[in-house]
Image (cartoon, rainbow, N blue to C red):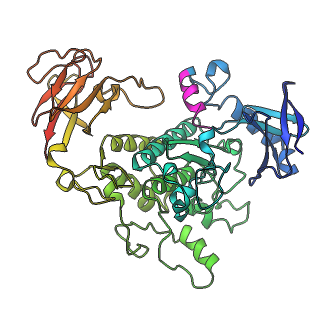
Amino acid sequence: MDKIAEAILENGTKLQYVITDNPPKGGMKYTYFSPDKSYVIQFFNDPDTANNPNVKKRIERIIGKYNPTLSEQDGGANGNTKESASYFLKKFCWPTAIVKYPEFGIVCPAYPENFFFDKDSSEFIDLNGKDKKSNWFTSKNRKYLSEKECGNFRSMLQMSISLARSIRRLHQAGLAHSDLSCNNVLIDPSSGDCVVIDIDSLVVPGIFPPEVAGTRGYIAPEVLESMRMSADDENRKTPSTYTDLHAMSVLIYEYLLLRHPLIGPKIYSSESAEEDDFLALGSKATFIENPYDTSNRPKELGVTIKDLGPYLENLFIRAFVDGLHNPSERPTAMEWEKGLVKTWDLLHKCENPNCLAEWFILHDTNKAVCPFCEHSVKKDDIIRLHLKKQLRGKCGQWIDCGVIDVYDNMPLFKWHIFSDVFPDEKADRDLQAYTCKYQGQWILVNYCVKGMTSPSGNLVPARHAVSLSDGAVFRASSEENGFLISVTAGK
């Protein structure tokens, strides 16, 4: 029978937890849930880790001065607002307190329910209550999951943006996760949500050294390659923000293309499977879509990085060709966030009711075909909004800064109206306008934008519309930093 125990926190607060015979156990900690399962108490597997004063000092700083889930006013990260803290509270499973009795440990919020499988998640195997680790969704295991769990391409892209934003926030604070992997980022493709966990092992560069090297398949090649060096060898590479960037790129590639970017058909060593794996993910690692070296390319790739549009193709080349063995060349988390957001604006709904992806990136209107099912887009349904911003101090001079692919009932937000707004955690997400097909004609309906003007220069009041005909040019807003929008249709 389960037993209720009591933990005492550093501030004297007492919390109850349920002792079970076989508590969930990870590489560093084992876990007990609270009676109502709203939080967990975690203790360390290794007593030496628990007794290490540097571990306690690290966790104190993670809970306090580096904490993006607390506002600066409440003792969290510098410059963190309550709004930003509230946003990232949902993106990280961040430790909230230190346990001093019955032994050293930490308190964390429990994962939201949508990050656990339920009894209907699979008709083939019992997954009820298990964590939604991403390798269930991005490997051959996917075939065991019910359709309701798998989401679609759009939700996987949404998770990619969320992950890039979360890692960008970590790196802005000078932190590195050190063990980003399918195990430490839980995902829910049905909602497009993800949450980063195992925060207590964060690396504070120059202050707290990393304790783990990472997880197979996500360890950066330079770290894996130097693992055989002695721990005190100055040439040995350890986890850092650069290694996070490699692991994050692997996760994003897996989310979008459902395969690993480095595991292909090439044999690197005939000595043993272990040595082959060591080389394939380490010193000899080769991107399966490397345009200059096809030695590790599978015969049938299916959907490729080219199908993801120019922004993501460029980022993946930088991550897995230029930066694979040269960490300083890897794109930053902020670059990933920006590229993913630009790609989001190129999403197009596939009209094939049997398409499992449901959405795709319409980046080439000359080849308007869903790469997942090869269903063609009708010319009449190709509508693009080309966003232009005015050069500062150069009245009437405009430069291109984005393209939006239009679909029925597509929402537009402030970052689609004003050039100085970016859809980060601080952005206003209130609806500004939307596009739709009305009586066979594509229109943009002004929901609440001030200063929107028609192609003829007339004011477009709220609840009125602009016709999205080929060649139309209008102001999203005549207010400062409002975009000029030009329309192309059927091409």
Tell me which segment is drawn in magenta. Answer: 83-92
Q: Which quarter of the rendering shows the N terminus?
A: top right
262, 323: nearer the viewer: 262
Q: Residue at x 80, y 49 (%)?
A: 23
Relative vertical location of residue 31 with respect to residue 464 in this rendering, above or below: below
Residue 333: within the magenta?
no
Q: Is residue 283 visible?
A: no
* Quarter of the view holding residue 74: top right
Q: Position of residue 478 (x, y in %)?
A: 21, 18
462, 13: nearer the viewer: 462
Q: Residue at x 51, y 43 (%)?
A: 163
Q: Main secondary structure of the magenta part?
A: helix
Left or right for 237, reference 17: left
Q: Position of residue 438 (x, y in %)?
A: 18, 31
Q: Is residue 80 visible?
A: yes
Query: Residue lying farthest bottom?
Result: 270
Q: Position of residue 207 (x, y in %)?
A: 70, 41
Q: Position of residue 46 (x, y in %)?
A: 84, 52
* Quarter of the view holding residue 329: bottom left
Residue 90: within the magenta?
yes
Left or right for 146, reference 273: left
Number of numbered discs on residues: 0
